């Protein structure tokens, strides 16, 4: 029963933070919408920062596992990279798309020594690391730089989809990525 309340709390916090940001959404609203008492919150999370960190760790786990599973279903390097862009395109078209929780977290907690900023930066680094692993065999020493560039295209597509409402941003970013990869 207690675990259910914790899950309700984290799930509602994730939903509200994604929609409204981390600083704008207060603990009282999360508690009211989750139907959880303040005592339960503090049993699991001594501070709002701890709750935000839990939300981001869980979001990272879901996001990366889903993204990598889409890529791993493909055989070739190019198809795996394209799958990353296709996954993003599908995400952008979902009703619950509200931009990147990690970009937003880094923007709201911009000091690099903030634990929240560090979790956001780690998420982005893990994405780059994954892309580099996909590229390594085919691109060798260039893989790291290409991975960073591809991640920048993905992040730019996220921003274009979120900020200006371009649902085709991922497909357009894939066109640029193909150039980077030496494909037409």
Image (cartoon, helix red, strand yellow):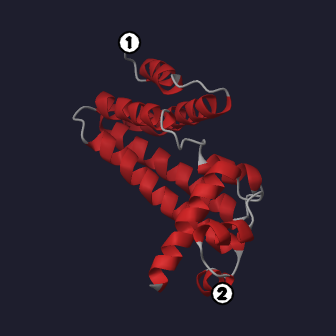
- Which residue is found at the position 73% from the left and 64% from the top? 114
Badge 1: few (under 14), some or many (20 or more) residues near its Cα, within 10 Å? Answer: few
User: Which sits in the foreground, 135 or 151?
Assistant: 151
Q: Is residue 84 above or below residue 177?
A: below
Residue that protrudes farthest toward the left in the picture: 75
Q: Helix or strand or loop: what does disc 2 sit on?
A: helix
Whole-percent x and y of residue 97?
55, 41
Picture disc at residue 113: none
Secondary element at image label 1:
loop
Relative to the observer, which residue lies in front, 152 or 62?
62
Name the outermost residue toward the top. Answer: 184
- Kindly identify the residue that appears in the image at 70 percent across and 53 percent down: 21
73 relative to 147 in the view: left or right? left
Q: Residue sitting at 45 percent across and 51 percent down?
A: 63
Residue 184: mark:
1
Identify whether 171 is placed above or below 162.
above
- Dividing the picture into quarters, in which one does residue 31 lie? bottom right
Disc with the residue nearer the chain's start (2 vs 1): 2
How far from the left and from the top, in percent, is residue 147? 47, 37
Check the picture and name the quadrant holding the C terminus.
top left
Q: Residues within 10 Å of mark 2 (few under 14, many from 20)?
A: few
Q: Looking at the image, do the residues carrying marks 2 and 1 touch, with CB atoms under 8 Å apart?
A: no
Residue tagged 2: 39
Q: Position of residue 144 (x, y in %)?
A: 47, 40
Q: Nearer the viewer, residue 44 or 115?
A: 44
175 lies above or below 60: above
Query: Where residue 151 sits in the image (x, y, percent)?
Result: 52, 37
Query: Which is more foreground, mark 2 or mark 1?
Result: 2
Q: Is residue 29 above or below residue 173?
A: below
User: Would you identify the image quadrant in which residue 33 lies?
Assistant: bottom right
Disc 2/disc 1 C-alpha distance (Å): 58 Å
Q: Work out which quarter of the rendered image holds the N terminus and state it.
A: bottom left
């Amino acid at each position: 029963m207690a675990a259910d309340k914790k899950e309700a709390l984290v799930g509602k916090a994730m939903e509200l933070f994604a929609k409204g940001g981390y600083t704008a959404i207060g603990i009282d609203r999360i508690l009211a919408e989750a139907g959880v008492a303040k005592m339960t919150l503090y049993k699991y999370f001594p501070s709002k920062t701890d709750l935000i960190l839990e939300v981001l760790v869980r979001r990272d786990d879901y996001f990366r596992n889903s993204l990598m599973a889409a890529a791993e279903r493909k055989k070739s390097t190019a198809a795996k990279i394209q799958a990353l862009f296709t996954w993003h395109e599908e995400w952008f078209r979902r009703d619950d798309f509200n931009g990147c929780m990690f970009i937003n977290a880094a923007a709201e907690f911009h000091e690099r020594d903030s634990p929240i900023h560090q979790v956001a930066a780690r998420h982005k680094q893990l994405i780059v690391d994954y892309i580099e692993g996909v590229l390594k065999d085919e691109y060798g020493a260039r893989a790291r730089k290409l991975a960073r560039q591809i991640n920048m295209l993905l992040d730019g597509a996220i921003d274009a989809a979120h900020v200006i409402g371009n649902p085709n941003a991922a497909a357009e970013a894939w066109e640029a990525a193909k150039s980077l990869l030496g494909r037409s």
